[in-house]
Image (cartoon, rainbow, N blue to C red):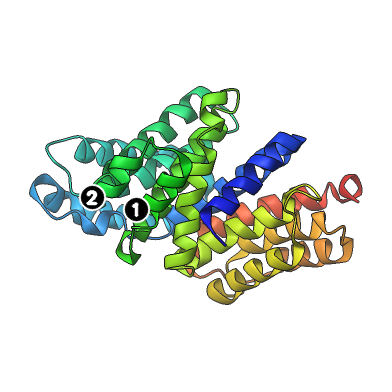
Amino acid sequence: MSGGREALCLDFALRRGGDAIWYALMRKLRIILVFALVGSGHGCAIIRSGVGRAMAPMAEDLAASLQRQSDVELVREGAPAYLLLLDGLAQSGAPQPKMLLAAAEANTAYAMAFLDQTDRERARAFHARARDYGLVVLRRNRHFRAAERAPMMDYEAAVRTFRKRDVPALFTTGTAWISWILSSSDSVEALAQLGRAVALMQRVLELDPDYRMGGAHLFFGLYYAVQPLGAGRDMEKAQAHFQRVFELAGPDYLLARVTYAEYFARYAFNRELFESTLREVLAPREDPPEFRLMNAVARLRARALLDRVEEFF
């Protein structure tokens, strides 16, 4: 499927009154992607020069510590210091692309987890900073740089010039860009950029569909499940995308299961699947260290969803 087709379906869904559904879709997607970003552990390992080289071990250890925490409030209180560190490194001198992406990921993650639902203005600023860091990296591609503001057909052609080595930048920038658009949902200008952000995620799906435990698959699983009937909804495609995420992440990645229940099972009007999936998430288990934080969030969300089952069905 082409990026143009995805963007067209998205624009059509919005025109058909699907904006509320898409807001719910992207809000949940942000929650998922934040933990894919925080839990990846890749960001700080690539700081290699000057002050960055000296700070790399500390930053890398901090990133690993965050993903192993089960106390969400502890992460909320400690993350700002990590952000200040990365922003300082990203804004000093001529930072390397991977340094910019590390800072983009951290800003997006913090805003998604702690600001999107409580302080929209601050969230918008964090997402804008993350998007801008990512776009600086993407502009190293001369085709993209020339077509960034060109008509959609030319823009999509430029996006297709990115290669597999560019997937981290495409994924990180696309996530930040979509998050900024949603935190600016009262802006027609921001909504008009949605197709461009989605095109980046489409290119990730084409180049490296398994990246970040299938982050692009998760995006398009949600995409096909929640679109309005007659405007792109395709539950078979949604199921296929979700199934690939489960294969890649394994049974211990609980946030993907919660997302599947909330969006696929709910929109398929399958109460049995909805409840059984969430109860499986809540079953006692020992979390792998790398999933402790995201699983803690998943369990909180699963309990909240089960409390609303009568409302949904």
Residue occupying the point 52% across, 37% down: 114
Question: Taking 121 as reference, is 30 above or below it?
Answer: below
Question: What residue is shown with label 2?
Answer: 97
Residue occupying the point 61% across, 44% down: 26
Question: Taking 31 as reference, is 244 above or below it?
Answer: below
Left/right of residue 227 with respect to residue 99 in the rendered view: right
Tell me which numbered mark, 1 or 2, is placed earlier along the sequence.
2
Residue 277 shows in this picture? yes
- Secondary structure at numbered mark 2: helix
Numbered tag placed on residue 169 in the rendering? 1
Label 2 neighbour load within 10 Å: few <14, some 14-19, many 20+: some
- Secondary structure at numbered mark 1: helix
Instruction: Pick whichever, 233 or 216, lies toward us.
Output: 233
Instruction: Pick whichever, 242 or 299, lies toward us.
Output: 242
Which residue type carries mark 2?
Pro
Q: Position of residue 105 (x, y in %)?
A: 38, 47
Which residue type carries mark 1?
Ala
Instruction: Residue lying at the far left in this picture: please name it.
Output: 50
Left/right of residue 309 with respect to residue 122 in the rendered view: right
Numbered tag placed on residue 214 in the rendering? none
Quarter of the image for residue 186 reads top right
